[in-house]
């Protein structure tokens, strides 16, 4: 098997000799090659930015243009050498012209040739980038995702948005062109893509998309998209106008997906002013709606929800509703609930443990909608959150009680540790 040998002498290249037979032919070939290369580069950038829906095909297109750059740069280097190197350099070195005793030796100028070739390649690359409006700079940040969002299948377009919103691309999120790619996807014919697009606008903190998100939340045909738009508005932060818009949609919505999204959006906004609008939904029969309403109240943590939560607890709620209500009381309890919680703790049978429920966003951001623990644990946390320091001795008795389950003693011990941290500050 022959060994690979890197050619460093220009006289051994033997490339495109037919185009260099005469200086006139070399000039015409170089000028024509430059025109074809730059036209191909401009056309390729337009095609990729405006038409193409295949990343793989784009790789072939870009590779083809780069191949043209190499060819025309080689021709340009031959022309520069023909015009500047001493003696019949083109005829003797490039075309392997005859040598004889009457012929003076001609230097190959291989080193200079290589330098000029590299400069020509770089110069043509920069020139292509200039005439295409910075295509080479922007393709990996904007163009690449524009292409993916023109893919034929909804799954491929959703995947493009999912990749765009990965933390590794966070530095590009503030780019207005990148943001425009996401907002344009609000009009995608697929509800799955629109749902991912509105969520992406919230995840990327595209404040300029607020009006579009509000209109999508109110008008989109898909309840899932409307719900996701409300969540996105919640991610964008608390503003009176957007809060009122989400509250309005919540009051009028009928489909569970839209209701759940509006509740979660209000939870993310974290405004006590939303509590009266959220409260009626804790009585809903739909599990996701009910759990999301309690979670929103827990996230907001306003005592304005306390009476309604206690009303649910003091009634005869289902096990799941009871779990959600007791969880919420951890955050909205007042001093009036401490005695009740301590008395309830003395009861042996409060019901089976609660199972954790999680709302998971794309990229695995998880929110615990319902905490998976026992009712006795919840009671300890209710007392701890409302008046932990005052009842340190009560927690200590739980820790010292050998008959108490190990998990309850651990929880009480953790509370005491938190009290010590507070006292040491």
Image: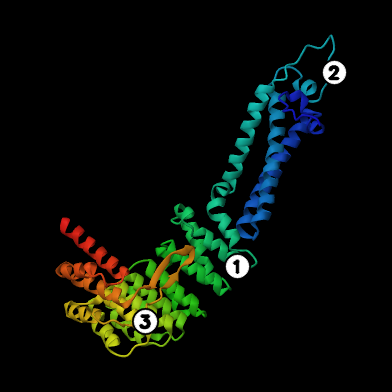
Query: Quick one: which residue is furthest to the bottom in this view?
Result: 316
Q: Relative to the observer, which residue lies in front, 269 or 71?
A: 269
Q: Position of residue 32 (x, y in %)?
A: 73, 40
Q: Which residue matches tag 3?
A: 248
The mark found on residue 155 in the picture is 1
Residue located at (75% from left, 36% from top) = 28
**Mark 2 surroundings within 10 Å by alpha-carbon count, few (fewer than 14), some (14 through 19), many (20 or more):** few
Q: Relative to the observer, which residue lies in front, 277 or 63?
A: 277
Work out which quarter of the rendered image holds the C terminus and state it: bottom left
Residue 281 left/right relative to 41: left
Q: Relative to the observer, which residue lies in front, 336 or 68?
A: 336
Q: Which residue matches tag 2?
A: 98
Badge 1 or badge 2: first in the primary sequence = 2
Residue located at (19% from left, 67% from top) = 396
The mark found on residue 42 in the picture is none
**Mark 3 surroundings within 10 Å by alpha-carbon count, few (fewer than 14), some (14 through 19), many (20 or more):** some
Q: Do the residues labelled 3 and 1 touch (CB within 8 Å)?
A: no
Q: In which quarter of the image is residue 373?
A: bottom left
Q: Relative to the observer, which residue lies in front, 208 or 130?
A: 208
Q: Do the residues labelled 1 and 2 touch (CB within 8 Å)?
A: no
Q: Position of residue 341 (x, y in %)?
A: 22, 79
Query: Quick one: which residue is furthest to the front in this view?
Result: 402
Badge 3 or badge 2: first in the primary sequence = 2
Dot 1 falls on a residue whose secondary structure is helix
Residue located at (57% from left, 63% from top) = 159
- Measure the alpha-carbon separation of dots 3 and 1: 32 Å
């Amino acid at each position: 098997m022959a060994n690979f040998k890197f050619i460093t002498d220009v006289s051994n290249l033997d490339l495109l000799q037919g185009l260099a037979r005469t200086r006139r032919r070399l000039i015409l070939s170089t000028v024509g090659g430059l025109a074809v290369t730059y036209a191909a580069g401009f056309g390729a950038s337009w095609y990729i930015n405006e038409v193409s829906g295949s990343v793989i095909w784009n790789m072939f297109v870009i590779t083809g243009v780069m191949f043209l750059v190499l060819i025309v740069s080689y021709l340009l280097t031959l022309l520069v050498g023909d015009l500047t190197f001493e003696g019949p350099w083109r005829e003797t070195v490039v075309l392997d012209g005859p040598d004889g005793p009457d012929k003076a030796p001609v230097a190959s100028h291989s080193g200079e040739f290589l330098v000029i070739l590299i400069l020509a390649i770089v110069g043509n690359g920069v020139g292509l980038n200039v005439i295409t409006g910075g295509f080479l700079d922007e393709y990996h940040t904007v163009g690449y995702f524009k292409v993916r969002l023109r893919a034929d299948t909804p799954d491929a377009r959703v995947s493009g948005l999912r990749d765009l919103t990965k933390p590794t691309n966070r530095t590009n999120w503030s780019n207005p062109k990148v943001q425009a790619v996401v907002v344009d996807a609000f009009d995608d014919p697929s509800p799955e893509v629109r749902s991912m697009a509105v969520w992406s606008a919230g995840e990327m903190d595209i404040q300029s998309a607020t009006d579009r998100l509000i209109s999508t939340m109110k008008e989109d045909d898909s309840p899932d998209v409307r719900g996701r738009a409300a969540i996105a508005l919640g991610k964008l932060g608390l503003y009176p106008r957007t809060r009122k818009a989400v509250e309005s949609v919540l009051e009028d919505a009928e489909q569970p997906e839209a209701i759940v999204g509006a509740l979660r959006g209000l939870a993310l906004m974290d405004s006590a002013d939303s509590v009266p609008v959220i409260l009626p939904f804790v009585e809903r029969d739909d599990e996701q709606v009910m759990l999301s309403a309690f979670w929103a109240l827990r996230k907001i943590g306003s005592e304005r929800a306390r009476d309604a939560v206690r009303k649910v607890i003091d009634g005869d709620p289902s096990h799941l509703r009871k779990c959600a209500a007791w969880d919420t009381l951890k955050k909205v309890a007042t001093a009036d609930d401490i005695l009740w919680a301590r008395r309830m703790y003395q009861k042996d049978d409060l019901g089976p443990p609660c199972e954790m429920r999680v709302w998971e966003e794309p990229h695995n951001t998880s929110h615990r909608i319902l905490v998976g623990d026992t009712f006795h644990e919840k009671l300890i946390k209710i007392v701890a959150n409302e008046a932990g320091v005052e009842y340190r001795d009560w927690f200590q008795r739980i820790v010292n009680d050998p008959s108490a389950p190990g998990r309850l003693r651990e929880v009480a011990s953790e509370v005491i540790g938190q009290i010590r941290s507070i006292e040491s500050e």
